Image: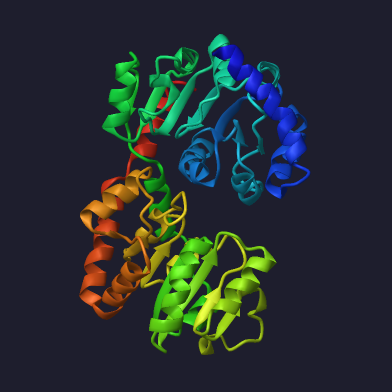
Amino acid sequence: MRNVYNLVVYISKYLLIFLSHFNKKIKLFVDGRKETFSKIGQLQNKNTIWLHVASLGEFEQARPIIEELKHTYPTYKILVTFFSPSGYEIQKKYKLADVICYLPLDSKINAKQFIEIVNPKLAIFVKYEFWPNFLNELKKRQIPTILVSGILREKHLFFKSYGGFMKNSLDAFHHFFVQNEASKELLASINFNNVSVAGDTRFDRVSKILEQDNSLDFIAQFKDNKYTVVAGSTWPEDEGVLINYINNNALENEKFIIAPHNINNEAIVQLKKAIAKKTVLYSDKAHKKLGNYQVFIIDTIGILTKVYAYANLAYVGGGLKTGLHNILEPATFGIPVIIGDKFSNFKEAVDLVKIGGCISIQNQKEFTENMLQLRGDKNYRTLTGTINKKYIEDNLGATKQIMNYLKTQL
């Protein structure tokens, strides 16, 4: 199987180059990796801590650890690698990292060259990023390697009869910090007992949002002290039910802020055109009396977290498509959250739906019914939001537990 894996990686390299001529995201994926080795060159012979994340969600899990490492070990260099362009493009200028780049494809040659240059004092992988050639190279060099905020599932190759080569790569990990007991039990089933259930570091990350300045003057002007729904990271499927509600059920004093996942010009124009209420774009807000508008479309990135601070209710997108976006950011503000029905791979969503802080909908009818109930019943909104806030408070502490361990490795 190892030879098959390496062959697939080799073929993927040329397939991706071909596809990059036709797909913008794949082009970013391919072109960005051309710069990796030149970027990491500046880390040669430096004391470096390497953190690898798949995309933006995993970066948010790494972020509180990066902040603590930078504070505790200010002389160390911080390297952050991304697999996905969607994460890299948003965080490529993150100030606490000394180098941010793409992880090269997981070939033997790439892994050996990368680890030789960086020679990290510590390697940290987040959630479920497992690249066997990189892990084997770390293992050969006996570099302390840990997994944080890990989630393991039975479908993973480690637990299959034909997944021996992937299981062997897990020997690289000195310790696994996982989110739940189920992951710990799965690792124990294949004889890995160097495991701690620490939870998810994102709880520590989102709790700090309340300590920062979340004020946005233009959002305050738009809100105008009225009941406001914030829809974050929406896809067309989400926007369909939202637009139907806005056009047919919204009251005049009910405000909506929509932050689409896709902010290309064509998509934004189509979204605005579909809304029958008076709508303004972030990019076109200058010299406008924002309080006169009912819908505000955020056609930019980087401000959604602060926008949630103005919400009475949040809708988080992705759950009507294939993958739910971050529900913890709005939840930390103590407001109700509505999501789609595809959330089974997200522990926090499963938990919050079960205890009533998060409401899952499957269709337009359910969306409208829940929107009307939450709009009309302030006590229900308060109770639901309080459940979310308490859930986050009850799950803090993963970063501290991980840092206590890291101090024994550095």
Q: Residue 146: x, y in percent?
A: 46, 25
Residue closer to the observer: 338 or 406:
338
Q: How is the image coloured?
A: rainbow
Q: Residue 330: x, y in percent?
A: 39, 61
347 to the left or right of 303 = left
- Can see residue 91? yes
Q: Name the quarter where the N terminus is drawn.
A: top right
Question: Residue 52 sits in which quadrant?
Answer: top right
Question: Residue 75 sits in which quadrant?
Answer: top right
Q: Is residue 137 above or below residue 343?
A: above
Residue closer to the observer: 238 or 62:
238
Q: Is residue 231 above or below residue 82?
A: below
Q: Residue 177: x, y in percent?
A: 37, 29
Q: Is residue 260 above or below residue 222?
A: above
Give me the residue at 46% from left, 67% from top: 231
Give me the residue at 57% from left, 9% from top: 140
Q: Residue 18: x, y in percent?
A: 77, 36
Q: How many marks?
A: 0
Please identify the residue farthest to the top as the structure is shown: 140
366 to the left or right of 234 = left
- Can see residue 310? no
Q: Is residue 152 above or below residue 250?
A: above
Give me the residue at 26% from left, 80% from top: 376
